[in-house]
Amino acid sequence: MRIALVAGELSGDLLGAALIAELRKRFPDARFYGVAGPCMREAGCEAIESIEALSVMGLFEVVRHLPRLLRLRSRLIRRFSADRPDCVIGIDAPDFNLGLEHALRRQGLFTVHCVSPSVWAWREGRLKTIARAVDLMLCVLPFEEPFYRQRGLSATYIGHPLADQLDDSISVEQGKARLGFASDSEVVAILPGSRHSELHYLADSFAATAHWLARKKPGLKFITPIAKPSLRPAMQAAIARHAPGLHWTLLEGGSRAALQAADAVLLASGTATLECLLLGRPMVVAYQASRWSAWLMLDLGLLKIPYVSLPNLLCREPVVPELLRDRARPEFLGPAVLDLLDSAGARQRQLAQFDAVRTELKRDAARRAAAAIATSLAQRMAKKSVQTEQ
């Protein structure tokens, strides 16, 4: 058996490695190859291309790299068309992988896509592309499977890999100790995002919010993980403009460590909100973008969901304050964070719901994914056998 995998992000590399380990239990003699990172290679995947080739973020970065990405996809189509693997698994990176999967499925190959794009939130028109490209969609959020099945597509909910990976047993005190904070200190983690555009819209507002909070609670400490070195100057400049003199620690990467050390978290809407939920830290979420983007998403109604943060979509009822656009300012953000610092009830309202979501998402995603793939492969082989006999 030959199984091809194409992972597009470091998170996909982790999931790909875990998936290879589970598939190998079912198919001990299988050969795994494709676009892989270090974890997948260590798990026994032959890297015919590096995962770095697909790790491109941001619209302008994608446009700049588009010719190279199209050439890469053409090479993979030719390679897999010639090899005829028993299964092709695209992990995330939908803009790249769905086109690849579509071309290969047209040639009769069995295609699986792991981690659904957010078609339930916006761009639902992509469902037509998915229907043409994917034999089996593996979903990481519980409401995604019924969403697909109601529209006639094959989908299986596997749980969220991040819920399997994160250690939610780390207490706030342990998190503080790891970063050198006193156990009795109060720490606010501030995460304005991992992209330059996010910092452009939120860094100043978040820094000014920290200043507002420090006036209310002298001695308050702040911590911000810097996703990549090029973001550091913008964050440092915002702190210098709005919050000079505060006890503020900037970490290289380390979003998980920052969240674990936090009594409360102020962060941009995005995947970090799910990490915050899974680690059990109370949060306030902000969203800000260009007037044009905000008008399209919120006013014109391109965004089809009632909340912008995953925690509020996953919890039984919305418990996370979402301060959007003109409300993403210190006079609104500050009181919302202060309430989490001063009110045990406000914290507990969030954390009680977070516990239930964590239990729902923690399903051993790689094992469930491997089981779904193995079942689909067996059904496909049985169908081919019947056709051959006829």
Image (spheres, helix red, strand yellow):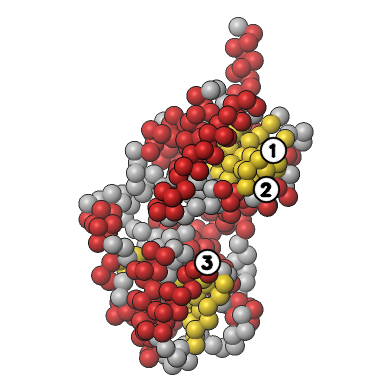
Write down the quadrant of residue 254 in the picture.
bottom right
Q: Disc 3 marks which residue? A: 228
Q: Which of marks 3 and 2 is nearer the N terminus?
A: 2
Q: Which residue lies furthest to the right in this view?
A: 29
Q: Disc 2 marks which residue? A: 40
Residue at x 45%, y 44% (from the top left corner): 66
Q: Earlier in the sequence, mark 1 or mark 2?
A: 1
The residue type indicated by label 3 comes to Lys
Using the rendered image of the protein, determine whether residue 23 is visible from the camera's viewpoint.
no
Residue 93: % across, % down: 50, 46
Write down the quadrant of residue 197 in the picture.
bottom left
Mark 1: give few (<14), some (14-19) or many (20+) Cα within 10 Å: many
Residue at x 31%, y 55% (from the top left corner): 306
- For this rendering, which residue is in front, 126 or 104? 104
Residue at x 57%, y 54% (from the top left corner): 11
Q: Is 23 drawn above or below residue 293 in the view shown?
A: above
Q: Disc 1 marks which residue? A: 32
- For this rendering, which residue is in front, 123 or 362? 123
